[in-house]
Amino acid sequence: MSSRPKDQGVEDARKNLPALLDRANRGQTVVITKRGKPFAAIVPVSQAPKKNPGMPLSALHGSGKGLSGRSAAAWVERLRKEW
C-alpha cells in the first residue's frame, strides 16, 4: 500500500520522526523539504535502493600487467630493500 508522497518540512520532520518512521513502515513515502525544496525522503525499506556490491576483484585481473617490470618477484624484493 503505497500512497502519494507527502511533504514535511525539516523542523517538523525532526519533531515527528517516530511518526514518520511508522508511516514508512506502513508503506508510505515522506519527502522532507528544506526551504520549500525537496531535500530527502523517508521511504519503506522495500523501496530503498539496493546496496551496490561493487566490482569483483576478478574484474581487475591483468589490469596492472607490466607495472612491475619483467619480474614481479624482483620488483617486490627491491621494494622490501627500500624499507
Image (cartoon, helix red, strand yellow):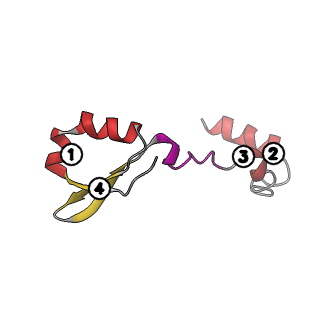
Q: Percent position (x, y) of residue 49?
A: 52, 50
Horizontal relation, residue 71 to residue 56: left or right: right
- In whole angstroms, how far apart are the C-alphas of marks 1 and 2? 57 Å
State which mark lies toward you, 4 or 3.
Answer: 4
Most common SS among magenta residues = loop
Amino acid at pointer 2: Ala
**Residue indicated by mark 1:** 13
State the residue at coordinates (40%, 36%).
25
Amino acid at pointer 4: Lys
**Magenta stretch encompasses residue 75:** no
**Magenta stretch encompasses residue 51:** yes
**Residue indicated by mark 2:** 72
Q: Percent position (x, y) of residue 81?
A: 67, 36
- In whole angstroms, how far apart are the C-alphas of marks 2 and 3? 23 Å
- In whole angstroms, how far apart are the C-alphas of marks 4 and 1? 11 Å
Proximity of marks 1 and 2: CB atoms separated by less than 8 Å: no
**Element type where label 3 sits in the image:** loop
- Nearer to us in this view, 55 or 38: 38
What is the magenta range? 45-54
State which mark lies toward you, 2 or 3.
Answer: 3
State which mark lies toward you, 4 or 1.
Answer: 4
**Residue indicated by mark 3:** 56
| Residue 6, disc | 4
Answer few, some or many: residues within 10 Å of disc 4's Cα (few below 14, many 20 plus, some between 14 and 19). few
- Nearer to us in this view, 23 or 73: 23
**Element type where label 2 sits in the image:** helix
